[in-house]
Image (spheres, rainbow, N blue to C red):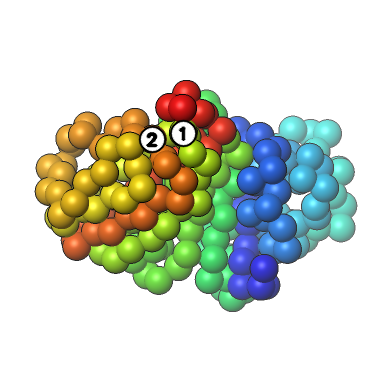
Amino acid sequence: MSQSTCTILLGGELSLTERLRQAVDGSRFIAADGGMRHAPALGITPELWVGDFDSTPADLEGAFPDVPKQPYPAAKAATDGEIAVSEAIARGARRLILAGALGGERSDHALQHLLSAVGLAEEGFDLLLTSGKEEAVPLLAGTIELDLPKGSLFSVLGFSDLIGLCIDNARYPLADFHLPFGSSRTISNVAEGKVRFSLASGRAIVLARPYDLSGV
């Protein structure tokens, strides 16, 4: 993995699965506030630690004395995660892995991570959001492939009308489909292996559960 990949450690849940370890292998790391708690479990030392530090446990603050800290006031116009992403981009990152972006106690933050990922994808960045057990990637006009275990679950969440949606190598394939905004038609599909998605126009997120084989 090239040094253009940066993993942002966020405050949501993170399970140390094999897929997560493979995804972040060779990556650079930046921690956002309490997301630093994932660093010991991953066995890594981030190159930067940013945030207002209102969700950082006291015992964690002294655990990484050599990591440069970039403090911000609590009354700021961006989340700690957004600040960390901006720092990663300023340092040359083109692929961003948002670890701890899904789940957790703050559903508002999790939703914002998904929306931000779509916006960043529109700017040409490559995004993966992960909790270890769940993974999400933006789907815009074009084609992407996800290497998923046979029988694992995935959904396509449209953030707009989706025009010309195609899903191949899934239990419920679609071809040139128009998905109205707000429709649940593309929730809970089942992968038959590597799944191919293509879209003519629209904005969406593919949310996958690679370790949930309940579709087998």
Alpha carbons under labels 2 and 1: distance apart: 6 Å
Could you say which quadrant of the image residue 88 lies in? bottom right
Residue at 46 percent across and 27 percent down: it is 216
| Left or right of residue 69: residue 19 | left
Q: Give the residue at the far bottom of this rendering.
A: 92
Q: Amino acid at mark 2?
A: Val
| Residue beneath the point at 26% across and 44% down | 173
Instruction: Confirm whether residue 106 shows in the render.
Output: no
Q: Position of residue 75 (x, y in %)?
A: 50, 45
**How many numbered marks does the figure carry?**
2
Q: Tell me the residue that label 2 is attached to.
A: 190
Query: Is 154 in front, or is 170?
Result: 170
Q: Quadrant of residue 145?
A: bottom left
Q: Which residue is mark 1?
A: 151
Q: Quadrant of the N terminus?
A: bottom right
Which class describes the residues within 10 Å of circle 1: few (<14), some (14-19), or many (20+)? many
Q: Name which residue lies at 28% across and 59% down.
A: 198
Query: How many residues crowd mark 2 within 10 Å: few (<14), some (14–19), many (20+)?
Result: many
- Give 75 or 107, whichever is nearer the viewer: 107
In this view, 203 is above or below 215: below
Amino acid type, label 1: Gly
Mark 2 residue element: strand
Is 69 placed above or below 170 here?
A: below
- Work out whether mark 2 precedes mark 1 in sequence or the reverse, and give the earlier one: 1
Is 1 situated left or right of 93 in this image? Answer: right
Tag 2–tag 1 contact (CB < 8 Å): yes
Give x and y (percent) for residue 138: 38, 54
Q: Residue at x 19, y 62 (%)?
A: 200
